[in-house]
Amino acid sequence: MTLLGKSFSAVILILSAVFMVLALAVNASHRNWRDVVLTGVNGQPGLKAQVEQRSRENEQLTNEKNDLLTDLAFEQAARRTALAALQTQLDQLKTDLQSSEASVQQLTAQLTVLSQTDLSRAQELERLTAENARLRTQVRTEQQDRDTLFTQTLELTDQMNKLRGFKQQLEERNLQLMAQVTRFEEVIEAKGIDVNEPLDGAPPERNGAILQIDRPSQLVLVSIGYDEGLREGHLLEVTRRGRYVGKLKVRNTEPDRAVAEILEDYSELILQEGDRVDTTLD
């Protein structure tokens, strides 16, 4: 190693020792500024809390100042209004002094008016006193009604709890019935039973309309069919706006329509497309 390299090594060693001493000194005198700002030290609140406290106090003082300024403005306006009113009264008094007789008469008339006003106010006070007594009585009555309603509420609550238990029983019974219905549907499907087939051969209560009329053959096409329980030989009543028109007899059925024969002996009017057809008429 050359002399220059040795010199650099010595300088680096000395500087390292110096920096180490400085680091130890800085570490010894180091303050955690984050704690100073947020939580504080030595039992004092943090700088952030102090700033927030000063901000709140400043805002409160500003609001109080604004309120005082507003009150002062209102007070000044009221004083100006009062001064203007007093000035007007002063001018009026000067005018009254110049015409004393007229003023006396005017004041007498005003006194009469004030007396009547005072009498009216006394009567109004008596009326309000009576109204206050009536309201007190009404309040007591309403309190009694409230107590009665509270008692009724307790009774209804008890009844509701009983009904909830009854409802639970009905729900359980409903589940049982649903299971039975499901079983019945499975049996019906397995047996090939048509639930739409009427038990006594009569058609179910259905209604539709005449779609088409073939007058030469005395046949009509109606909008109800086999799916609605209509079968060959069933009779249909025809009406128009509630008025009886005639009668039909089913000859052939399809799922959603059927062909029927016009029974001339039962016809009162000429059938038209759109007329209503019913399986029964009440």
Image (cartoon, grey):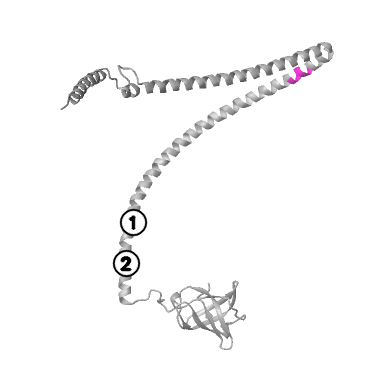
Residue 37 inside the magenta-drawn segment? no
Q: Where 100 falls versus 221 (above or below)?
A: above
Q: Quadrant of residue 211?
A: bottom right
Front residue (pair 225, 24): 24
Q: Is residue 128 above or below residue 245?
A: above
Q: Which residue position holds label 2?
A: 182
How far is the residue under mark 1 from the one under mark 2? 16 Å
> Which region of the structure is painted magenta?
108-113
Q: Main secondary structure of the magenta part?
A: helix
Nearer to the camera, 99 or 265: 99
Residue at image position (44%, 35%) is: 147
| Mark 1 Cα-neighbour bin, 10 Å: few <14, some 14–19, many ≥20 | few
Which of the image's four quarters has the N terminus? top left
Amino acid at dot 1: Glu
Q: Position of residue 189 (x, y in %)?
A: 32, 74
Residue under label 1: 171
Residue 226: where, in percent of width, then height? 44, 78
Residue 22, horizontal then vertical, whole percent: 25, 19
Total number of numbered labels? 2
Q: Callout 2: helix, strand or loop?
A: helix
Asked if the stretch drawn in magenta spans residue 110, the answer is yes
Badge 1 or badge 2: first in the primary sequence? 1
- Label 1 secondary element: helix
Most extreme residue toward the left, as rendered?
Answer: 1
Amino acid type, callout 2: Thr
